[in-house]
Amino acid sequence: MTRIPALVIAVLAASGAAFVPVVTSSAGATTVPACHNADVAVRYRATDSGAGHRYGRIVMINVSTHACHSGGFGGLSYVGDGNGTQIGAAADRVGTWSGFTLRPGQRAFSPVDEVVAGNYPAATCRPAHVDGFRVYIPNATRSKYVPHPTTGCRNTAVHLLSHRAFRLA
C-alpha cells in the first residue's frame, strides 16, 4: 500500500476528514479505485420514528460497471430556501468507520437520526422549511442532493442531525 506522509494524515485527522487510500497491489498497480460521485447514486430511506426522533438511512449504490473502494463518514446537512442554502448545523458524526469495496449494484448505507425541530422552542430553533439533504459521499469534494422535505432549525447551535459511517448493506 502507498505510504501517506505523516503531515497529510495529521491535517486530515485535525479536519475530521475520512481518508480512504486507493488499494494497490505489492507491484504498485491500482486494483480497486476510490468511489467517486459519478460511480454512485444516493437516496434516503425512512425507517422508523419515535420519542421526538425520525430514523432513516442514506443509501449509496454503486451504479458503475467497476468495483470501487469507500468507507467513512462523508457529510450530511439540511438544505432549503429553494437554492441549496444550508439550514442549521451539519450532522454530527457518531461511532467509528472502516473501509470496504463496493461492487457494481451493491449498496452501502449511513444510518441517520433526525431530532424533530418541534422539540425546541421556536425562538431557539428559528424553524425553517427544508427541501432535502446535501450529501457528500466519503472523500468527495462535490455534493449530491437528496429530496427530503421537513422542518429544520436555522440556529446552528441546535444540532438536529447525526449519522454513522457508511457500511455495506
Image: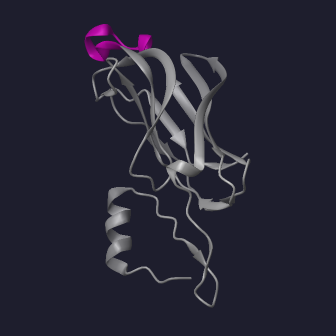
The image shows a total of numbered marks equal to: 0
Residue 23, located in which quarter of the rendered image?
bottom right
Residue 143, located in which quarter of the rendered image?
top left
Residue 116 visible here:
no
Q: Position of residue 137 (x, y in %)?
A: 50, 48
Report the side of 20 relative to 157 (left or right): right
Q: Residue at x 58, y 67 (%)?
A: 33
Check the image and report above or below for 113 versus 163: above
Q: Residue at x 73, y 49 (%)?
A: 106
User: Which region is colored magenta?
Assistant: 117-128
- Which colour assignment does the render follow? one colour
Q: Residue at x 48, y 16 (%)?
A: 149
In front of the other: 16 or 149: 149
Residue 62 visible here:
yes
Q: Residue at x 74, y 47 (%)?
A: 105
Check the image and report above or below for 62 versus 6: above
Q: Position of residue 53 (x, y in %)?
A: 55, 20
In front of the other: 105 or 59: 105
